[in-house]
Image (cartoon, rainbow, N blue to C red):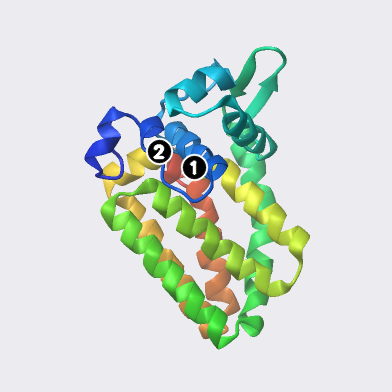
Amino acid sequence: MTSVNGDPRSDAGYISTIHARSLREQVRRGLEAALVAGELQPGEIYSAPTLAERFGVSATPVREAMLQLAKDGFVEVVRNKGFRVIEMSDDDLDQISQIRMLLEVPSTVRTAKLLTPDRMMTLRELADEIEDAATRGDVIAYLDADRRFHVELISALGIPRLTDLVDRLRRQTRLFGLEALVRSGKLIVSAHEHHELLESLRSDDPAATTRLMEAHIGHTRGLWVGRNEP
């Protein structure tokens, strides 16, 4: 098994290397890592008991984690069989990218006047975490810090439903193309964009913020999936 995060334990497979707080979250993170690494293949059906055996846990936390992944659009429930990994088509990615452009770009521009010094400090720390994870090639740590960064940023608007929707849309496309990005070194370039974004927000530069966010989202249809960006 190819190691993405540089941890020699990952040679045994991501499913055997789970690190998180609650058991369900441990299992979820392990499943996400397995999706990134290609251990769980699009179109294949996996039962909770079978995955539980591989995790060395009971079927309950696996089923709970898979149901959460189904809610986020990564898998679908197949009655009496288990869960099928959903394959993102080009049309799916196009639609999600278009929705994200409509939601995230203007929303992020609006946050510039709402970022308190404390929130900005938190965002800078998360941007540092993102770059550090990218430098190490630790994809799961990258995904975790990236998610927390954008949730923290959008939550400045004080619209929980928007924050939840943006978070869900981002999660649906963040598990694709990551291994190739790590190998190419482009994940580090993508990571640095978070600091550039914070600088544009600090300067209250709507044009720069718009350009950076459009490029950031554009990666979903470009370098993140091994294609030229529009």
Q: Position of residue 8 (x, y in %)?
A: 22, 39
- Tell me which numbered mark, 2 or 1, is placed earlier along the sequence: 1
Residue 191 relative to residue 101: left or right: left
Is residue 28 visible in the rendered structure shown here? yes
Q: Badge 1: how crowded within 10 Å, few (<14), some, or many (20+)? A: some
Q: Is residue 169 above or below residue 52?
A: below
Q: Which residue is mark 1?
A: 26
Q: Position of residue 122 (x, y in %)?
A: 50, 75
Q: Secondary structure under badge 1? A: helix
Q: Which residue is mark 2?
A: 226
Q: Amino acid at mark 2?
A: Gly
Quarter-of-image position of residue 14 = top left
Q: Is residue 25 above or below residue 82?
A: below
Label drawn at residue 147 = none
Q: Which residue lies at the image location 41% right of the left edge and 40% below the top edge?
A: 18
In space, the residues marked 2 and 1 are separated at their CA atoms by 29 Å
Furthest residue to the top? 80
